[in-house]
DNA sequence: AGTCATCACTCGTAAGGACAAGTGACGTCT
DNA sequence: AGACGTCACTTGTCCTTACGAGTGATGACT
């Protein structure tokens, strides 16, 4: 290491030096970084040290490494898709998902029967092991290449009350909303948002690059009856998508807290 | 490696074996994993290979490593705080932030003068380098230990029109909302949500563990005039916090798209 | 001219050794 | 009994060496 000795570990000094160089603009977004061999010579350190530094920057999401080609500065790029999470209705009363147009289904969805887990049971205000319909979709946005995993869960009890719902649990959510409305429900939704690192299967299914978290949404449809009607889950790579909400002031007192 | 040879790299096989063992419940959340030495003996591989495998699991957020103590299974814990992102008003019309009660300010906030960047300028529908007031806060929730970074940005032009706003730009957002309302504005908000890996300074400020993304919110306050009034940014570790929104159907046609 | 082998470059994987540094318990000394 | 040093354990850092594997250009062969 030819330079500073400050922050501690050698590889961190190297990482910091490269990070500075990038942020200073010495390496433009998309441009290749020096190869490992060059970094070894530049900073007079061994290869593991260089690789350790590169790994750190990779974990930060600052660079991207391609086998056989080199390391490249990641464009600090904004997400290319904004998912508008509002629910709109046409003048005839039909539901329109603002982003419904851009999503394409990769495969024909096939509904299945399953049961609530502790997590999904809590969101649906049911116990564990309660029967429900499920339907998974892999959505893609051809324009941006964004992928997302969508899951619809409908409790048996709810499906039984809405005949058409039980016959075709593979419908898109907007259809289910319409059926529920025709059954006399006035709908509203609660949505929770989390971010976490993807599991290995999510990484491959969503084709995520390194150091890319996913946004994990859970939307619960509420009707006029007390209990939740539908649970939808959406998982999407945070490198590609951002969410948009609209908020208006309401008069209800604040409640809710968990922990 | 004493077992399977399938997926490719040795360290990935080791990582997969450990991952399986964890998910199978062989190691309970919070329990210590075998030490590196034990893993070396168990799988008959070298130390770098074991460390590589452990590093992979760490990047997945599955385990946590403490220097001098060992590796531990991370509790797949749900976030301990749910941030209700609604805006409520009391019967007198005052604004109440649902989570305002739990947040504590670590230091006295000091407002400053700054300028829009391309990112903040776009959200405020201003150009770059436009003058504005800024005020940063480090929020903490003593009960859960959750930390968050909050920033308020108010364009000069807006502050000039609302006298009290310009005199005390360090007020909490609810106060600013109140002043805007008294100036005749009927408020609504648009909020965008992103997730990304933290920068080094965010990691330390928010005291984030490894492989923990942050949720990055941008809330824009809109009034009766056409232009945005306030921009608030909130950054919080996704291991501790989740977001909650309430959605009602509206009749506006879908718009918006970026990319 | 077109096809394909080769080569030089890149990063990925794996092993081995050595020492530093954090942690906690045990045992000795005061 | 209490304080403190030591020691055995843990992970962290760093080096050397070697080979495997993906990529693209060069050049020879057909």
Image: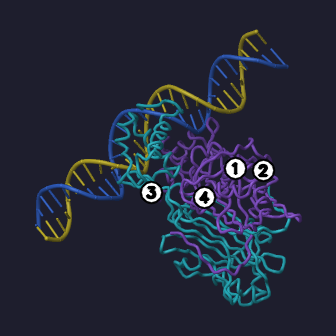
Chain colours: A cyan, B purple, C yellow, D blue
3 vs 1, front mark: 1
Name the residue carrying label 3.
B8
User: The C terminus of chain A is located in which quarter?
Assistant: bottom right
Point out the tag, 2 or 3, that comes first from the N-terminus.
3
Point out the tag, 4 or 2, that comes first from the N-terminus.
2
Element class at badge 1? strand
- Chain letter of mark 2 equals B
Q: Is residue A125 left or right of residue B223?
A: right
Q: Is residue B156 left or right of residue A69?
A: right
Q: Could you say where residue B130 lies in the image, as x and y percent from the top left?
A: 57, 54
- Chain letter of mark 1 equals B
Q: Could you say where residue B179 lies in the image, as x and y percent from the top left?
A: 78, 58
Residues under numbered marks 1 and 2 in contact, where contact means CB atoms less than 8 Å apart: yes
- Residue at the spot 40% in from the left edge and 34% down from the top edge: A45
Name the residue carrying label 2.
B103
Point out the tag, 4 or 1, that comes first from the N-terminus.
1
| Crowdedness near tag 3: few (<14), some (14–19) or many (≥20) residues, C-alpha within 10 Å | few
Point out the tag, 1 or 2, that comes first from the N-terminus.
2
- Chain letter of mark 3 equals B
| Crowdedness near tag 4: few (<14), some (14–19) or many (≥20) residues, C-alpha within 10 Å | many
The CA distance from mark 1 to mark 2 is 9 Å
Name the residue carrying label 1.
B148
2 vs 3, front mark: 2
Say yes or no: labels 4 and 2 on the same chain. Answer: yes
Say yes or no: labels 2 and 3 on the same chain. Answer: yes
The CA distance from mark 4 to mark 2 is 21 Å
The CA distance from mark 2 to mark 3 is 48 Å
Name the residue carrying label 4.
B195
| Crowdedness near tag 2: few (<14), some (14–19) or many (≥20) residues, C-alpha within 10 Å | some
Point out the tag, 4 or 3, that comes first from the N-terminus.
3
Q: Could you say where residue A218 lies in the image, as x and y percent from the top left?
A: 69, 68
């Amino acid at each position: 290491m030819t330079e500073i000795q400050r922050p501690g570990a050698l590889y961190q000094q190297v990482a910091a030096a490269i990070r500075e160089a990038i942020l200073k603009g010495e390496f433009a977004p998309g441009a290749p970084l020096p190869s490992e061999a060059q970094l070894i010579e530049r900073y007079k350190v061994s290869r593991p040290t260089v690789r350790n530094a590169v790994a750190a920057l990779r974990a930060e999401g600052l660079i991207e490494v391609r086998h056989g080609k080199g390391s490249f500065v990641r464009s600090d790029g904004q997400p290319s898709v904004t998912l508008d999470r509002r629910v709109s209705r046409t003048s005839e009363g039909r539901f329109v998902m603002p982003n419904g147009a851009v999503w394409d289904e990769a495969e024909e969805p096939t509904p299945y029967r399953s049961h609530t887990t502790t997590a999904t049971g809590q969101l649906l205000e049911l116990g564990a092991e309660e029967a429900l319909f499920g339907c998974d979709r892999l959505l893609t946005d051809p324009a941006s290449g964004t992928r997302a995993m969508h899951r619809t869960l409908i409790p048996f009890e709810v499906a039984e009350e809405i005949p058409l719902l039980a016959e075709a649990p593979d419908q898109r959510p907007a259809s289910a909303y319409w059926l529920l409305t025709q059954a006399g429900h006035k709908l509203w939704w609660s949505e929770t948002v989390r971010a976490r690192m993807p599991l290995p299967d999510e990484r491959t299914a969503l084709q995520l690059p390194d150091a890319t978290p996913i946004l994990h949404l859970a939307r619960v449809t509420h009707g006029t009856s007390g209990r939740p009607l539908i649970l939808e889950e959406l998982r999407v790579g945070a490198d590609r998508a951002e969410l948009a909400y609209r908020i208006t002031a309401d008069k209800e007192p604040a409640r809710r807290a968990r922990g």
